[in-house]
Image: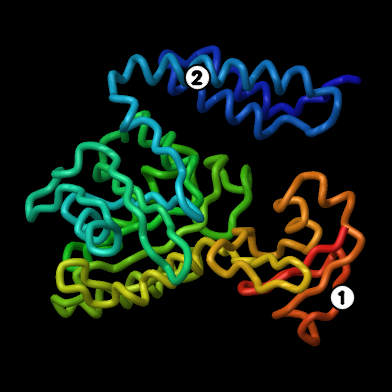
Amino acid sequence: MPANLPPQYFEAEKRFRAAKSPEEKVMALEEMLAIMPKHKGTDHLKADLRRKIARLTQEAEKKSGAKRASMLIEKEGAAQVVVVGMPNAGKSQLVASITNAAPTAAEYPFTTQRATPGMMDFENIKIQLVDTPPLSEQPAEWWLRNIIIRADGIVIVVDLGSQPLAQMETILTQLAEMRVGIGNIKAGEEDGLILHPKKALIIGNKVDLGNSEGYLALRNKYAAQAPVSAASAKQGNGLEPLRYEIFKMLDIIRVYTKAPGKKAELDDPIIMARGSTLQDAAEDVHKDFRARLKYARIWGSGKHDGVMAKRDHVLEDGDIIELHM
């Protein structure tokens, strides 16, 4: 079967051949992979591109000289959220205030030199937040791009007392150079070819200093792209509601299982994307359950508690399901 590759693919291929660094080559290969039509005729080519991306990624990591601990943060908990911001925006203080992490936080800029993970409690689950070195007008470290791409969401921390709109513009420019975009966009939709759309939450920090105008300007300009919240990491204002805002931003739900005649296991939810169905939940419990599922009962989003539900029933946060094989 012919691949039928579009002209944009060959333009990206030219950029790949002209690229000097492994990082530039990987970005060109990712563009080629995103542009490529999805059918059997491209399967071999896709596999070849993925092998090249893996090899060049390893080469870039070795070249950077960064410690492996900074290059790869293993995901833990219900989701992984990377926290980014400009120098002295207060992101390290924010992470330290709502997790068990202890990143270096100070009044002077560039105190964070590596990625530091911490676990944030939200009701009965934990969400991993990863503090990162500050973004600036200089290109970000190669390993930082890897962490951002792998994360489930992004928290952008903006200092409300220091030109918040200009900060956001710089941050979004840096993310775009990594082929990362925020908001309701799809891969390949924009002129800059965003390959990695991410859920995001924008936090206007240092609200305790009375910078309401900066917060309103931030919300008016960017609320259509991502939710905007206000907090004070140093004083603790708005931190408890922030936990819920991060959970809501991720667009995930918690689903609980129960065996017939027994109570639900409320301390160990299944974490799923919003819009998931009963059939998806059965497969999450065990890969064979999807095919073997005869019927299920549901408590929560059903019309009545314990009512039988179809495979395509869309689940809601807090639902309890009883699977029958």
Q: Where residue 196 sits: x, y (%)?
A: 54, 43
Q: Where residue 136 sits: x, y (%)?
A: 25, 43
Residue depicted at 32% across the width and 31% down the height:
69
Q: Amino acid at mark 2?
A: Lys
Q: Where residue 13 sits: x, y (%)?
A: 61, 19
Q: Quadrant of the C terminus?
A: bottom right
Quarter of the figure with residue 46:
top right
Q: Are marks 1 and 2 in contact (CB under 8 Å)?
A: no
> On the picture, is 30 further left or further right than 40?
left
Looking at the image, is 241 positioned above or below residue 134?
A: below
Neighbor class of circle 1 (other Cα within 10 Å; few <14, some 14-19, many 20+) is some
Q: Secondary structure at mark 2?
A: helix
Question: Looking at this view, is 122 or 31 the one in front?
Answer: 122
Question: Looking at this view, is 137 or 133 the one in front?
Answer: 133
Q: Mark 1 against mark 2, which lies toward the viewer?
A: 1
| Residue occupying the far bottom of the picture | 304
> Which residue is tagged 2?
25
Q: What color scheme is it?
A: rainbow
Residue depicted at 76% across the width and 84% down the height:
305
Residue depicted at 51% across the width and 50% down the height:
152
Neighbor class of circle 2 (other Cα within 10 Å; few <14, some 14-19, many 20+) is many
Residue depicted at 41% across the width and 36% down the height:
145
Q: Secondary structure at mark 1?
A: strand
Q: Amino acid at mark 1?
A: Met
> Which dot marks residue 255?
none
Quarter of the figure with residue 168:
bottom left
> Which residue is tagged 1?
308
Question: Looking at this view, is 266 or 78 the one in front?
Answer: 266
Looking at the image, is 242 positioned above or below residue 2?
A: below
